[in-house]
Image: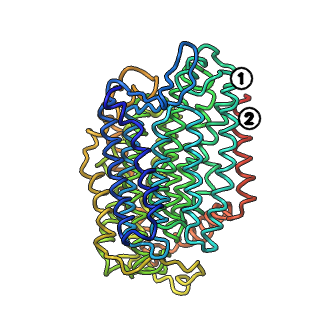
Amino acid sequence: MTLLETLVPFPVVLPLAVAAVVLAAGERLPRHVPEALGIAAALAVAALSAVLAHGALGSTPVYWFGGWVPRPGVTLGIAFAPDPASAGIAAFTGLLFAAALVFAWGFFDEVRSVFNVLMLLFLAAMQGFCLTRDMFNLFVWFEVMSVVAYALTGFSLRTASLAGALNFTVINSLGSTLMLAGIGLVYARTGALDFEAVRTAVDRMGDDPVVIAGFCLVSAALLTKGAILPFQFWLADAHAVAPSPVSVIFSGIMVPIGLFGYAKIRLQIFPGSPDAMDILYRLVLGIGCATAVFGGLLAWSQRHLKRLLAFSTISHVGIMLTGVAAVAPVGLAGFLAYVVGHGLVKGTLFMLVGILLAEKASVDELDLRGLGRDIWPAGVATAVAALLLGGAPVGILHGGAHLIDAAAPPGPAGWVVRLAALLGTVLTGGAVLRFAGRIYLGLGADPGDEAHAPTDQEREKAGRPLWLMLAPCVVLLAIDLLTPAGVVEGLAARVVPQFGVVGPAVDLPQPAAWGLLMPWLALGGVLLVATLALSGDRLPRQLPRVQASVLTPFFAGLNRLHTGVVNDYVVWFAVGIALFAGWAAL
């Protein structure tokens, strides 16, 4: 066994071991030691995974637990196989956890080490999810990740937190049930769970209907975790009530990692089944576009900042899904780069909203009008993040968007994909820029009594140093800004051939007129919609009338779909499953 193969399990073992030590030592440890151990473990995991990603270029190492290597015709053991893309996403996960734990320094007085133990378990589960190549083991890490996420959502034990955690638990548990059923169908027909062994069997059987049904069930479960329309209802409720450091992880990586799992299953197990590759192509591409627009519209209509960012995440995972749906190597490379770029920006934005909760005891955009002037560095960071989210032609997020745009299908369908991405980008970037202008510059009309609309009283731990909370924001933004888009595109393209059986190499697209115009068009749209929203009574009289008679009822109708009642969400989940089943039957 090589040194690289020996290192493979450690990104999972290390956080589990540190969590066990922190849990066993408990209150006997000095106050900040559990926090320091958590940060050190997350950074070590990021470094280990980065080493694995680099070492795996050219040849993916495989680690068989217990030495149960395959025998001719029989595969009983469980293996981790960190291809460069999987290990790279695992490394980014460790980095984001380290940033969230730095932001959470001194956040909890009463529970102390319990929060750090849960975060380390969360980190270990995500590492296992990224690195495994066994279907049932994938389900196990999926479940561990979900259970810890439920606990972290309801961590404060407030009524709203428990309600959000309940919605999260019920919908994602239904998804887990589908996933287990799908894996059972695949195992029943192929007699294997190892990715490579299942892929060999699928190649031999072709379009077996039972295997296809299993693929559809597993796909629906992963798209539920990825908050794709119409499985997205749990997300805003959970993200709005979770502690800010937890929301950083939820939106930064947990939701996109559902799509990562979907891409992995589709490309590493089912490339030999034309039906599995094609049966959901148009459906997934279509719901990706719908999700991008739907999330953007709902993000624009929010005044609760954490819900605004949550709906923004829904919009951007819709854009990511169009890259996955394309199945083209360029689209996959764009998806991987977009996951990292979006995670850096969205993680930063949730921390900046956490600063408002700590310093101003509110996340209501109208209530906070003009109150952020004394913490202007947070305003500058918010404006920069808004421009990056809105398509600014610089950094990692732009690199991912460029590749996804290049992977759009030819003809009218491609223009639909591009238009959906443009709308989602403009609406989400414009919404963030709007609240930055209103809160930190006091722009926009005085809301009067509307500023005091009833919302839950929210506050997070006050009195923490502003520089400490801002430091991880600056680091994450700097990584996104200072990494050239061309370098990102090249790296993403280099790791794709080992991630999926899609071709020997990725041809990076040559700059096209639309590709050059798109980011500037999006940026112009962001500035336009934010300016219109903040212009208030300086607008022509006709515009407020249009807003009152058309836009307000439209947005109210969209928001009424998110009732917060779990029964309603279960009905929408059933509608989504029926849609999948009907499409597959055609």
Is disc 2 placed on a helix, strand or loop?
A: helix
Q: Residue at x 63, y 28 (%)?
A: 279
Image height of 273 relative to 539, above or below: above
Q: For the residue marked with disc 2, what is the amino acid?
A: Gly
**Quarter of the image where one finds residue 569:** bottom right
Circle 2 residue = 582
Q: Nearer the viewer, mark 2 or mark 1?
A: 1
Q: Residue at x 44, y 54 (%)?
A: 252
Is disc 1 placed on a helix, strand or loop?
A: helix
**Quarter of the image where one finds residue 88:** top left
Q: Position of residue 355 (x, y in %)?
A: 39, 73
Question: Disc 2, disc 1: CB below 8 Å?
Answer: no
Judging depth in this view, the residue of 12 and 514 nearest the camera is 12
Q: Position of residue 26 (x, y in %)?
A: 46, 66
Q: Position of residue 143 (x, y in %)?
A: 60, 47
Q: Residue at x 61, y 26 (%)?
A: 276
C-alpha gap between disc 2 and disc 1: 14 Å
Q: For the residue marked with disc 1, what is the amino acid?
A: Pro
Task: Return the disc, 2 or 1, that comes first in the chain's sequence.
Answer: 1
**Quarter of the image where one finds residue 142:** top right
Circle 1 residue = 209
Q: Position of residue 584 (x, y in %)?
A: 70, 30
